[in-house]
Image (spheres, rainbow, N blue to C red):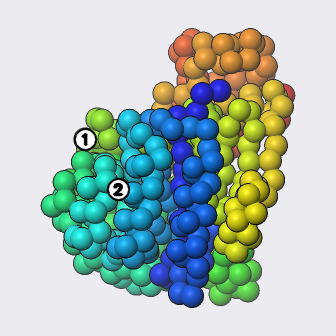
């Protein structure tokens, strides 16, 4: 397995969001510089030197100071030759003109901004650090610095969010002529503030029908724009699709660097240790900073090929499946495919199997069909 992508994790945030279950820590009093030294060390130990895509996520990479950000960028660009997409996650309020110019100077060509909503009351409920005006300023700064591709994340099915609220946020995002939009429904993840509040009856989430209505509106509205849907939750102008995320959906290999990062290299799926101090200790002891790793069985790999590939509008390639596993999709999933076609949840062109519009709305139910038939 030739690996040409890497994910780099910066687990620090200026503020912890109420819904987030990623590996993250409040940045104050954290050993940030020590962490960066260890992260750089881990990257140097890898076998790869040439990459097609690099994605720096978090936490919030832009929570780093200008000097820390520069140190990280110097290291990444010295260790790796990045031939294609170089993405950074960013919080709108942290994306100063100085920081975004620094990112551009070191070859960052894609920014993914965690906007989530334009409504001030909802930003507060989500625990976001930015205000609505910060979004406009951040996009303006990114344009001024010459970042070629700008993506905004928007959320729906939020506490106290109406369909009108979501429509309004979507229109505001589109009004800025954005290159790419990712839009996700809220999932209540264990260990988040939202999850604990919900269990105590302190959080009211709109019912599932409202969430479906918001997603259907999203699909219909995006059909009217230049941003075409290429994955269940992702929409981009031509040439602005996330090439890095496609690596995940195509079930291809990638390195994961940093505390809590995951990777898939030479058939091994691995997760790095989460706590920053544990990660630092392992690197300083010249150990792999691994929490756990597995080698998926062929059955598990086939499941992954189906439920990840079906997320993309193009769907799962019959030819590619056959080449990978020396079996046809019908050999393995004949019953599931017949059933889903009959229920009009998937299309089968003979070359690709993909979700119908209804299939996209209830995608998780479709994916489950391929988890039960191996």
Residue denoted by label 1: 226
Residue wearing tag 2: 111
The residue lying toward the viewer, choosing from 192 and 364, is: 192
Q: Residue extending furthest left?
A: 144
Mark 1–mark 2 Cα distance, whole angstroms, equals 19 Å
Say whether residue 248 is visible.
Answer: yes
Label 1 or label 2, whichever lies nearer to me, is 2
Is residue 21 shown to the viewer in this render? no
Residue ID at (54%, 76%): 32
Q: Residues within 10 Å of mark 2 (few under 14, many from 20)?
A: many
Q: Position of residue 168 (x, y in %)?
A: 30, 67
Marker count (numbered) = 2
Q: Is residue 52 left or right of residue 45?
A: left
Query: How far across and down, in percent of the image, does residue 309 sit?
Result: 59, 32
Query: Mark 2 falls on what kind of element?
Result: strand
Image quarter for residue 151? bottom left
Depth check: give the residue in front, 303 or 32.
32
């Amino acid at each position: 397995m030739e690996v040409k992508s890497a994910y780099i994790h910066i687990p620090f945030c200026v503020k912890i969001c109420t819904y987030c279950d990623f590996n993250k820590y409040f940045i104050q009093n954290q050993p940030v510089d020590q962490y960066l030294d260890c992260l750089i060390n881990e990257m140097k130990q890898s076998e790869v030197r040439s990459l097609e895509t690099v994605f720096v996520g978090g936490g919030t990479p832009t929570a780093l100071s200008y000097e820390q950000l520069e140190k990280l960028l110097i290291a990444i660009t010295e260790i790796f030759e990045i031939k294609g997409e170089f993405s950074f996650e960013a919080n709108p309020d942290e994306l100063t003109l100085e920081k975004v110019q620094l990112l551009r100077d070191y070859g960052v060509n894609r920014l993914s901004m965690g906007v989530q909503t334009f409504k001030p009351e909802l930003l507060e409920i989500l625990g976001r650090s930015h205000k609505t005006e910060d979004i406009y300023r951040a996009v303006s700064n990114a344009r001024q610095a010459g970042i070629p591709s700008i993506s905004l994340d928007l959320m729906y099915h939020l506490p106290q969010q109406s369909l009108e609220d979501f429509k309004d946020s979507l229109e505001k995002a589109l009004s800025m002529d954005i290159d790419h939009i990712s839009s996700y429904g809220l999932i209540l993840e264990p260990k988040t503030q939202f999850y604990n509040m919900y269990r105590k009856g302190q959080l009211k989430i709109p019912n599932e029908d409202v969430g479906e209505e918001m997603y259907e509106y999203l699909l219909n509205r995006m059909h009217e724009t230049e941003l075409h849907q290429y994955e269940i939750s992702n929409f981009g102008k031509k040439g602005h699709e996330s090439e890095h995320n496609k690596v995940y959906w195509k079930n291809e290999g990638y390195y994961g660097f940093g505390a809590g990062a995951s990777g898939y290299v030479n058939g091994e799926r691995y997760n790095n240790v989460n706590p920053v101090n544990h990660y630092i200790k392992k690197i300083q002891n010249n150990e792999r900073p691994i929490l756990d790793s597995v080698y998926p069985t062929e059955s598990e790999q086939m499941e992954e090929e189906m439920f990840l590939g079906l997320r993309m509008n193009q769907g799962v390639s019959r030819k590619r499946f056959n080449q990978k596993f020396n079996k046809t999709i019908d050999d393995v999933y004949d019953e599931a495919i017949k059933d889903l076609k009959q229920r009009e949840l998937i299309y089968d062109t003979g070359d690709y199997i993909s979700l119908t519009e209804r299939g996209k709305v209830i995608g998780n139910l479709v994916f489950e069909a391929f988890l039960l038939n191996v």
